[in-house]
Amino acid sequence: MMLFKIPIIGQLETVARHVLDWFHGTLHLPWAWAIVATTIVVRMLLVPLTVKQIHSMQSLQRHAPQMKEIQKKYKGDKAKQNEELMKFYRENNINPAASCLPMLFQLPVFIALYYSLKTFSREPAAKHPGSLSFLHFIPSIAAHTTTHWGGYVLLVVYVASQMMSTLYMSATADKTQRILFMFMPLVFVFVIARFPAGLVLYWVTTNLWTVGQGLITRRLMPKTPPPDLFKRTSRTPPKDDGSDGNGAKPAAPETPKAETPRPAGPPRKVRRKKGAARRR
C-alpha cells in the first residue's frame, strides 16, 4: 500500500530517519526498539494535548445529561439540535474536538515511519545485518506483517491493545458507539496486515501507552457527581415534570382548611337584663 508522496512527507521521513538513526547509532538500540523509543518520545511530547483530552472527556461526562435533554427536545430538527449543542458547548467551555488532537498529531509520525520502513525494505540486507528483527520472532520489521508467523502474533496483540485503548478513550460515547468502536480493530486488521511490521509495532506501543494512561487517569479522575446536582444553563430545556431550571419542583398551593361544623342542638336562650325590660 503506497501513499502519495508530497514534499512535506519527504521532510517528515527525513526527520523520522534522523531520530531512528540517533537511537540506533548513538544508543545502540536495534531498529525495532528504536521505533519503540520514538513512540514513547512522541507520546511524552503529546502529554499536554492528552491532558486537554482528559479534561474534555471529564467535561463531556459531567454535562452528558444536559446534552441528552437538548437532543431529546430537538430530536426532529437536526439542524436546530446541532445549533443548540454548539451554543451549549460555548457556554460551558467544552471542546469536543480536543479528544481527537493526540490522534491527529500522531498521523504525521505514522506516515513518516511508513516511508522510513519502505526505505529499509529497498536497502540491501547487508546494510542491516540481523538488526531488523524484533524479539527473535519477527525476522524483519521492514517486511509485511503477514510474511512470518510472528507477524500474526503481533496482529493479535494489536487488536487486543486497540480494543483496550478504545475502551478507555470512548468512555463518553453511548453504548452503540462503544460497541462499534470495539469491533473496528477487527475490520482494520486486514488493512494493518499489509503494513510493515515496524509500523504495527509503533501502533501497538502507542496503544499500550494509552491503556496505561487510562489506568492512571481512572484512579486520579474525580467521580462524576449525580445528574441532579448539575448546574443548568439557559440552553438546557426545562423538564416535563414541572420542575424549575435547577431541578426543584414548585411548592404545591395550600388548600384552605374547611371549617369544622358545629354540632346541632337546641336553640340558645337569650337572657335579657331586667333594666332593659322595665324601660319598655
Image (spheres, rainbow, N blue to C red):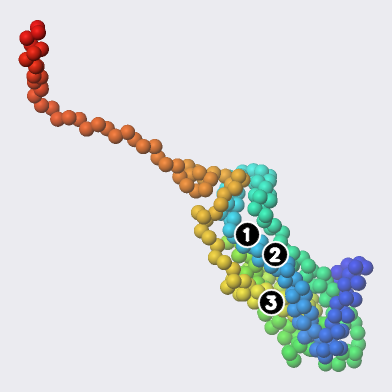
Q: Quadrant of the N terminus?
A: bottom right
Q: Which residue is drawn at the image coordinates 86% and 69% (left, top)?
A: 3
Callout in the foreground (2, 3): 2
In this rendering, is residue 226 above or below 152?
Answer: above
Quadrant hosting residue 144? bottom right
* Element under disc 3: helix
In this rendering, is residue 138 above or below 176?
Answer: below
Q: Are marks 1 and 2 in contact (CB under 8 Å)?
A: no
Q: Which residue is drawn at the image coordinates 84% and 87% (left, top)?
A: 24
- Residue at mark 2 to residue at mark 3: CA–CA distance: 17 Å
Mark 2: amino acid = Lys
- Residue at mark 1 to residue at mark 2: CA–CA distance: 10 Å
Q: Position of residue 232 (x, y in %)?
A: 57, 49
Mark 3: amino acid = Trp
Within-10-Å neighbours for mark 2: few <14, some 14–19, many 20+: some
Q: Which residue is mark 3?
A: 209
Within-10-Å neighbours for mark 3: few <14, some 14–19, many 20+: some
Q: Which residue is mark 1?
A: 59
Q: Which residue is drawn at the image coordinates 77% and 85% (left, top)?
A: 33
Q: Which numbered disc flags the more N-terminal residue, 1 or 2?
A: 2
Q: Position of residue 258 (x, y in %)?
A: 27, 32
Q: Which numbered disc flags the more N-terminal residue, 2 or 3?
A: 2
* Element under disc 2: helix
Q: Which residue is mark 2?
A: 52
Mark 1: amino acid = Ser
Q: Which residue is drawn at the image coordinates 61% and 65% (left, top)?
A: 171
